[in-house]
């Protein structure tokens, strides 16, 4: 479970806070999506949850160990995928310890659970963006978390890899009971997997609630300053709702009229 109360963050010497007085609760086994335009503090909020930056106000309570998956991961060294995933065992190994056979076995199981054990001996630098993202999820999974926090896990991925990552998150929640918090710029992804959604508009202006209630035409159009329309797609008897931005005509004029 994650409980956030009156959370605020302001950069030193900044005139205004990035966000302030935000509050929400994510129950155990829930998937929580955070959406908002660029610069509204989505990544900063995740870093506060993960303990990477200190909020300037409010309280965060997290029950259980947390795994963090950043939006981008780069290393100047061509570590093998197996070594990268074993690094997820760091909090179990300790500062001056060395990974044990158990640590390596857990890392191998994380690779197998995500279906990427075939990459184990390949250098991380030789993988595609989608493959690297799966490796970073495996690294977080190897830490044996109860909570997983992911910053735009489908960023820069093609449709196929986006679908794989989203299906993986659902599977981890269903099989392991993980509590998952993720940021996304794609409302469709939040509709597909999230139970709840937080819409960040900047400062103290936000909405939070059930995903279906938050991710509506009206709310999303106001959030992004662009007309957005719901559409229903039926495939194999399953009806899925998607959100489509209306980009025809003078986009800038249309956006100004909505804002």
Image (tube, rainbow, N blue to C red):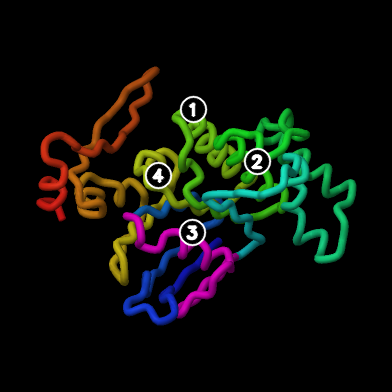
Nearest to N terminus: mark 1 or mark 2: 2
* Residue at the (75%, 35%) spot, across then down: 120
On screen, 189 above or below 89? above
- The foreground one among 258 and 106 is 258
Mark sitting earlier along the chain (1/4): 1
- To which residue does mark 3 refer? 26
Q: Position of residue 109 (x, y in %)?
A: 76, 39
Q: Residue 34's quadrant in the figure?
A: bottom left
> How many angstroms separate mark 2 from mark 4 (CA)?
22 Å
Compute the Cα span from label 1 to label 4: 17 Å
Residue 31 is left or right of residue 103, and the answer is left
Q: Which residue is mark 2?
A: 135
Q: CA distance from mark 1 to mark 3?
A: 28 Å
Could you tell me which secondary element the residue under label 3 belongs to?
strand
**Residue in the picture at 46% in, 78% down:** 58
Neighbor class of circle 4 (other Cα within 10 Å; few <14, some 14-19, many 20+) is many
Q: Earlier in the sequence, mark 3 or mark 2?
A: 3
Q: Residues within 10 Å of mark 1 (few under 14, many from 20)?
A: few
Earlier-in-chain disc, 2 versus 4: 2
75 horizontally vs 95: left or right: left
In three-dimensional space, the C-alpha distance between marks 3 and 2, rounded to whole angstroms, equals 25 Å
Residue picked out by circle 1: 160
Check residue 190 in the rendering and tell me which mark sits there, or answer none.
4
Residue drawn at (51%, 31%), measured in percent from left and top?
161
């Amino acid at each position: 479970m994650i409980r956030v109360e009156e959370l605020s963050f302001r950069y030193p010497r900044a005139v205004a806070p990035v966000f302030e007085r935000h509050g929400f609760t994510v129950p155990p086994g829930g998937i929580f999506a955070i959406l908002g335009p660029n610069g509204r503090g989505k990544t900063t909020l995740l870093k506060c949850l993960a303990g990477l930056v200190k909020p300037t106000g409010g309280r965060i309570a997290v029950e259980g160990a947390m795994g963090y998956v950043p939006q981008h991961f780069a290393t100047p060294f061509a570590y093998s995928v197996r070594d990268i995933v074993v690094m997820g065992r760091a909090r179990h190994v300790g500062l001056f310890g060395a990974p044990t056979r158990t640590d390596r076995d857990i890392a191998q199981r994380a690779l197998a659970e995500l279906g990427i054990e075939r990459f184990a001996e390949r250098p991380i630098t030789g993988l595609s963006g989608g493959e690297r993202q799966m490796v970073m999820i495996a690294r977080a999974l190897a830490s044996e978390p109860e909570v997983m926090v992911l910053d735009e896990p489908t960023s820069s991925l093609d449709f196929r890899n986006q679908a794989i990552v989203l299906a993986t998150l659902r599977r981890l929640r269903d099989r392991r009971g993980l509590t998952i918090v993720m940021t996304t710029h794609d409302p469709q992804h939040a509709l597909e997997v999230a139970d709840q959604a937080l819409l960040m508009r900047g400062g103290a202006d936000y909405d939070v609630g059930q995903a279906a209630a938050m991710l509506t035409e009206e709310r999303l159009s106001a959030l992004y300053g662009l007309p957005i329309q719901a559409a229903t797609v039926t495939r194999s008897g399953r009806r899925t709702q998607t959100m489509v931005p209306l980009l025809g005509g003078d986009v800038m004029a249309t956006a100004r009229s909505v804002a």
